[in-house]
Image (spheres, rainbow, N blue to C red):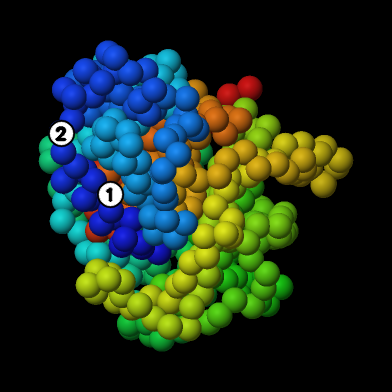
Amino acid sequence: MQPFVIISIVLSGIALAEAPDVSNGIRKHWNYNRSAVAEICGPKTARVTCINRYGSLLPGSFFRNPDPFTAYTGTVISEDPSWPLVQQADFVLFDRRRGLRLLGPSPRIRRSIVPLLNVIHEAPVFVYVIPPIRYLKPELNKLFVAQAGPPGNLSSLVFDLNLNPPAVSAFTTDPPIYQPNGGIYNAKDGMVYWAVHGNNASLPNGLHQRPGIARFNPRTLKAEWLLNSYNGFSFAGPNDLTIAPDGDIWFTDTDYGYVLGVSESPKQLHLATYRFRPSTGEVQVMDTSLEYPNGIAFSRDGRTLYIGDSGLEHYSPIPTRGPNDFYNYPINIEFNSTEARNVFAWDVTRVNQGPSRRLIIGRKRNIWQSLEGAPDGLKIAANGYLVVAAGLSPGVDILDEFGSQIARIQTNHAVENIQWSGRDLKTLWLVGIGGITKVQFDLAGPDLHRYYIH
């Protein structure tokens, strides 16, 4: 999760809305000059642009403001008339062969499909229950989305995907869970698990809450708490979570709740990644090396752990609503472009020694540095690719398991997290500040009932 960045949104919005249509000129340009940075490629159902040589060789006059607010499309390349194709694109391909394969024959994108508050939207979780009779509508076909703010808000959103366009309504769990920020569906028990960063002892109706891990039944909305303390300390604010092959819950802990005004308390502990065993209640710190641990996921074979670090963001004592009061209430954040904006990987090893059976991690390495913003929510596709929300910026990046950039999706709002839906899991939802985007392509999400494959 990251707070908003309006400038990147504005830059991207201008690029998408106002960049001149130069497609015909570029086709001519490419017939005679093979040094262009980009070219049109792929299906005609969306604006698809291929970057040549990963954009690693540009005309010498190129310029990009190092401010993290500046989107990738905000790069200035005045000497190359092909660059507006990148600014206009729905999909940008860095690896043409693999990129075209994941797009499929008819990729589509639909931006801002429902009106939303200009606050962060996070923790998208898809729940799909197959009906007993094949041709009936699914019993449950819903996308649950958390709304991070304004302070005091106890409701989240649910999208009924049996309808087109989806019907959107607010819901509150019983008892209410204040400000979840990360979510995952656990097919083994049919529950939605939330990483919750809301921290407030004076909520409506006398509700007292500390940050932690909770879960709820998507049918009944009945909720229960699983974790809210580490040796008497309060967590800073669990940001995102994943379920390991052995059933333990791994989660990242940051102080974004305090930054967003949904937590009354500053951090008490070092920001860290934790392992929580629901069956016993045991909690263990697994890593403290990241500045701001964020999105987290295990590979499909369970042998690699990926975590994003959005360390270029920090608490600021000076509140801001952004340019033109874009955000719906003041938040406390500042940015430093020279800090971490990376995704890291660790090898995962299973230790089988009596009661100490557990997973341990080692051989940490950086695999990717974000093109813009900082990595936020990340998910693993069915084929093992990483799909990473840009957080500060209006995009989603698609990488292979080694961090090689294959493609990116560009929209018109900051993207905090992503989630697949549909019977074939080939619809991807991008959720963020003031917008939700629907993408349909051939890159499928993992089986909800069989994530781990060995």
Task: Kindly identify the residue that appears in the image at 18 percent across and 24 percent down.
Answer: 25
Residue denoted by label 2 = 21
Judge whether 301 appears above or below 363 on screen.
Answer: above
Which sits in the foreground, 132 or 420?
420
Quadrant position of residue 349: top right
Q: Amino acid at mark 1?
A: Ser
- Outermost residue toward the right in this view: 353
User: Regarding mark 2 in the picture, which secondary structure is present there?
Assistant: loop
Check whether the beta carbons of the residues at disc 2 and disc 1 lie within 8 A of each other: no
Task: Kindly identify the residue that appears in the image at 42 percent across and 56 percent down.
Answer: 65
User: Regarding mark 1 in the picture, which secondary structure is present there?
Assistant: helix
Residue 125 visible? The answer is no
Quadrant position of residue 404: top right
Q: Amino acid at mark 2?
A: Asp
Judge whether 66 appears above or below 331 on screen.
Answer: above
**Residue 161 locus on image (x, y percent):** 21, 39
In the picture provided, is 250 more to the left or to the right than 102? right
Residue 142 is tagged as none
Judge whether 12 appears above or below 81 on screen.
Answer: below
Task: Kindly identify the residue that appears in the image at 38 percent across and 75 percent down.
Answer: 331
The quadrant of the picture occupied by the N terminus is: bottom left
Q: Residues within 10 Å of mark 2 (few under 14, many from 20)?
A: few
User: Marks 2/1: CA distance?
Assistant: 15 Å
In the picture provided, is 266 more to the left or to the right than 22? right
Residue denoted by label 1 = 12
**Residue 144 locus on image (x, y percent):** 32, 50
Task: Kindly identify the residue that appears in the image at 59 percent across and 56 percent down.
Answer: 340
- Outermost residue toward the top in this view: 31
Q: Residues within 10 Å of mark 1 (few under 14, many from 20)?
A: many
